[in-house]
Amino acid sequence: MTYLLAGDIGGTKTILRLVKVSTPKPSGQPLLKPEFERTYSSQAYPDLVPMVKEFLHQAAIDAGHAYDPERACFAIAGPVVNNTSSLTNLAWSLEGDRLQAELDLHRVELINDFEAVGYGVFGLAPEDIHTLQAGDPDGNAPVAIIGAGTGLGQGFALCQAGRPLVFPSEGGHVDFAPRSELEFQLMRYLIDKHQISRVSVERVVSGQGIVAIYQFLRDREFATETSEVAEAITAWERQTGLSTKTIDPAAVISLAAAEGRDRLCQKTMEIFVSAYGAEAGNLALKLLPYGGLYVAGGIAAKNLALMTAGTFFDAFSHKGRVSSLLDRVPVHIVLNPQVGLIGAALRAAAP
């Protein structure tokens, strides 16, 4: 029996999963069954190795027998170069060769967390996605992945011999392209506020972007702040510069918008969702991903009603004389928050 180890490693928490590999499907993709899973506080450990050893010990106690995984893949919230990574928000320096030796594994691969999402979309079940447009799927065409969260991840994948090959990118740092007078004012606001010469799309289409849009509308007195939201945003602004913040302002704003109790928040999310759709459409035009475009990241799944109300897709498909090219693109919202963990397991299972 073959076992694999998958991990999703972030500055705050790390999720580890032990996976059993079964007989491959006719397509060649192995069947992966989660066997044991635990979530740990990343800050509570000096390195990944003692965490993994504790995890395997707990798994053995739970099952009544020891596990001996052969390979591992860890998705890292940060850049990975030559199978090494120094996490941005965690004092860990990880090297695949060192982890392989100290954990006595045959292979350890480190990949960027959004690259893991790219692999993960190939392992999703039908209930893990919400389809905005069925399109005309083509299994030989590229697959595009975009996901707004802390930042804005973008990438694409190709299938070779029935196996996905994922290419991450830095597409979230391309220029923000305003499409209305209000968005031009937003761009100028961000340039002046941050004393910068350009605005990346990530400054608008991300969790930080939601807050930035709210601050722009508030400072322009678009509508009156409600006391509850105002108190939360002001408290968060006071925490600027602190390593640990107790408030998630984007969540506060999106919840107030979803419940229809704050006009300022509603307009914020309207601008955000429209900009998100426009950038997803930009990515689709560059790749023509008739294999599917997947919208990942926690914001989309947590705001499904807003994402499916029409604003996102209207902006996605509004591309002038080439708009018809996007009619064939299957567009899906990823609902499973563990898509990155699924992707890490699929990558560990690859030959």
Image (cartoon, rainbow, N blue to C red):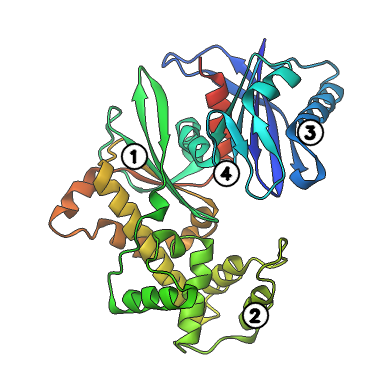
The local secondary structure at tag 2 comes to: helix
For the residues marked 4 and 2, what is the alpha-carbon distance in whole angstroms?
29 Å
Label 1's element? loop
Q: Which of marks 2 and 3 is nearer the N terminus?
A: 3
Name the residue tied to disc 1: 292
Q: Where is residue 102 in the image (x, y as percent from the top left)?
A: 75, 21
Q: What residue type is labelled 3?
A: Met
Residue drawn at (49%, 81%), measured in percent from left and top? 264
Is the Cβ of the residue at disc 4 closer than 8 Å to that at disc 3? Answer: no
Instruction: Give the Cα distance between marks 2 and 3.
Output: 37 Å
Residue carrying label 3: 51
Horizontal and vertical percent position of residue 222: 44, 87
Residue type at mark 4 is: Gly
| Residue drawn at x 53%, y 71% as measured from the top left | 211
Write down the residue under mark 2: 234
Choose mark 1 or mark 3, whichever is in front: 3
Closer to the chain start, of discs 4 and 3, is 3
219 or 327, nearer to the observer:
219
Q: Earlier in the sequence, mark 1 or mark 3?
A: 3
Q: Distance between the residues labelled 1 and 2?
A: 40 Å
Query: How far across and down, in percent of the image, does residue 178 sit?
Result: 30, 69
Kindly report which numbered mark, 4 or 3, lies closer to the viewer in this rendering.
4
Instruction: Name the amino acid type tagged 2.
Output: Thr
Tags 1 and 3 touching, CB below 8 Å: no
- Residue 290, image quadrant: top left
Within 10 Å of disc 1 (Cα), the crowding (few <14, some 14-19, many 20+) is many
Q: What element carries label 4?
A: loop
Q: N-terminal of the two: label 1 or label 2?
A: 2
